[in-house]
Image (cartoon, rainbow, N blue to C red):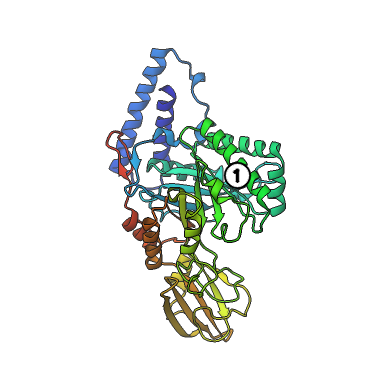
Amino acid sequence: MLEFAYRFCCFIKSTITKREEGKVASKNDILKYRLFVAFDLILLLLIFSQKISIKDLPSPTALLSPIPLSVFQNKAYAKSGKEVFGFAPYWTFNKLDNVDFGVLTTLAYFDLETDSSGDLDTTGPGYQTFMSDHATQVFNKAHSYGDRVVVTVTNMDADSIRALMDDQSAQDNLISNLTTIVKDRGIDGVNIDFEYAGNPGQGYRNKYTRFIHNLTARMHQEVAGSEVSISVYASAVKEPKIYDISDLGKEDIKIFMMAYDFGYAGSDNVMPTSPLYGAKEGKYWYDVSTAVEDFLALMPAQKLILGTPWYGYNYAISGKPKVNAPTGYGYGVPETYTLAKEDIHPNMEGITAYKEGWDNIGKVGWKAYFAEESGTWRMLFLDDAKSLGIKYDFAKDKNLAGVGMWALGFDDGNPDLWNVLRDKFGVKIADSRVPGTNL
């Protein structure tokens, strides 16, 4: 009780003192300040009545961590009952003002890197941003809306991943590091994003599943109410990788399907990065609906999160713009939703022609323009409110666990994508039994 009161007082105080300089206090701020004073008095009474020394209170270092979600548990729930899972990369962490925390259910910080020994890279910008005061403020804000906060741990090197899977002590080291950092930062779990592009064989799939099983068991044991999820390629069933979807589907985890990069930077032909249909029609090599169908043949729908792209690739093409036009002029340039929306339009500088279209099979729109300087057409597919709304309806029709996005901040300054999420899934509803829900 004492620790809760102490942490809550400090949380309210920090909420007030960290407001922008020069901003006039609102009625809300005054109310919070009065509550802070009241809790201070209660805290003093607790100290005197229980004869507790100040040295028994939590250390100032501990207060750098966000208040854990367990303090807020049961105060809000998703109206739709669905997950809205957003990755927040460290490089967009200053562009989260647009995030609708009332619609979001899980904020997945991205990323902390791990190596083959299970150690976390504490020198890179991912770790430094994760440990910053700014991150603490964002995590606390997410918690105040009843959202979960998890940290994404990555390894993108095949040799390193195999070495980690071959070394039980390294796995144990990583699991200990992750449970410790989750507890120290007062967050709610982890997302494992090991991107092994090839097929390592069934032996490594078994090892990966055991690692996830052991991690989940330890996380649940040490962090009450914690959640573990994994990120997997959408083609993981069609082209086997390190993920055994059938066995992983039996674990107490969520599986985030990265249902994008079907069309990628190095594609020979221009296609949507996330076509909903087209594979069965022979138009595309694979698509979202077929990938989901393949996954659901092996695992429960209620554990699968459909990841969606808030970006597209801008290709120079040979010839005129059309679906599956040959690229032929190097790699596609990634464009965030906001950049593509604001920078590519009929009145942009340096163009002599502009076109737009809709792929009725892939269910994604495209833009194209003739760049005068290079003398070539450029073309990109971009998921927007229309195409994403169709994908969200698809996820609901399939009774999936929910949807997610790569990535928060790519929508910087544009409410369009949050509006469609709010329309399809609704805002979370406060639980009247617990006061103070920030909704």
Label 1 SS: helix
**Residue 258 x, y percent position in the rendering:** 52, 57
- Taking the image as shown, residue 98 lies to the left or right of residue 371, namely left
Tag count:
1
Task: Give percent across and percent down for residue 342.
Answer: 44, 71
The residue lying toward the viewer, choosing from 149 and 342, is 149
Q: Is residue 112 left or right of residue 80?
A: right
Front residue of this view, candidates 109 and 74:
74
> Which residue bears the numbered disc 1?
209
Residue 229, placed above or below residue 404:
above
Residue 180 to residue 280: above or below: above
- What is the three-letter code of the residue carrying label 1? Thr
Visible residue check, residue 74: yes
Screen quadrant of the N terminus? top left
Looking at the image, the residue that sits furthest to the front is 297
Q: Where is residue 241 in the image (x, y as percent from the top left)?
A: 62, 55
- Residue 295 placed where, x, y %? 50, 55
**Is residue 21 in view?**
no
Q: Would you identify the image quadrant in which residue 389 lies?
A: bottom left
| 142 or 47: nearer the viewer | 142
Quadrant of the frame with the C terminus: top left
Relative to 187, 35 lies left or right: left
Q: Residues within 10 Å of mark 1 (few under 14, many from 20)?
A: many
Q: Decide: is 414 above or below 64.
A: below
